[in-house]
Image (cartoon, grey):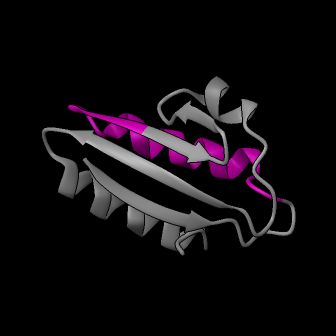
């Protein structure tokens, strides 16, 4: 299992557009399960409904856990996306 730690740098928090981009990338990761944790809450990163149910505010940390057959490749792609969204810690 690999982990990525992120930080929401957007004053509006984790927006629906950001959630949609994260979910789209997660769904490309066949063979891996991705879970996002923030505080006491968690969400399946492949489910837009799960992600939208989270309310992650500005300056709040989150962790993504990646578990599966091609973890490193998925981690690299997720880190690239998080960096482009200015969410990588």
In-image side of 84 versus 49 (left or right): left
Viewer-side residue, 27 vs 63: 63
Place of residue 75 in the rendered image (x, y in percent of width and height, measured from the top left): 30, 57
Q: Is residue 26 magenta?
A: yes
On the image, which quarter does residue 20 sit in?
top right
The correct choice, above or below, for 11 with respect to 67 in the image is below
Q: Residue furthest right?
A: 12
Count of numbered labels shown in the rendering: 0
Q: Is residue 18 magenta?
A: yes
Place of residue 22 in the rendered image (x, y in percent of width and height, measured from the top left): 53, 47
In-image side of 19 versus 70 (left or right): right
The correct choice, above or below, for 39 with respect to 47 in the image is below
Place of residue 24 in the rendered image (x, y in percent of width and height, measured from the top left): 48, 40
- Look at 65% across and 52% down and name the residue there: 18
Viewer-side residue, 36 vs 25: 36
On the image, which quarter does residue 9 sit in?
bottom right
Read off the magenta span.
Answer: 13-34
- Look at 39% across and 47% down and name the residue there: 65
Viewer-side residue, 21 vs 49: 49
- Look at 80% across and 58% down and name the residue there: 13
On the image, which quarter does residue 89 sit in?
bottom right
Place of residue 49 in the rendered image (x, y in percent of width and height, measured from the top left): 66, 24
The correct choice, above or below, for 83 with respect to 63 in the image is below
Q: Residue furthest left?
A: 69
In-image side of 2 versus 85 (left or right): left
- Look at 32% across and 45% down and name the residue there: 66
């Amino acid at each position: 299992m690999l982990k990525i730690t992120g930080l929401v740098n957007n004053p509006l928090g984790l927006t629906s557009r950001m959630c949609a981009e994260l979910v789209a990338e997660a769904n490309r990761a066949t063979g891996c399960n991705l879970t996002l944790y923030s505080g006491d809450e968690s969400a399946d990163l492949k489910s837009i409904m799960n992600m939208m149910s989270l309310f992650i505010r500005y300056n709040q940390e989150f962790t993504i856990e990646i578990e599966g057959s091609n973890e490193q490749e998925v981690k690299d792609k997720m880190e690239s996306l998080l960096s482009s969204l200015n969410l990588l810690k």
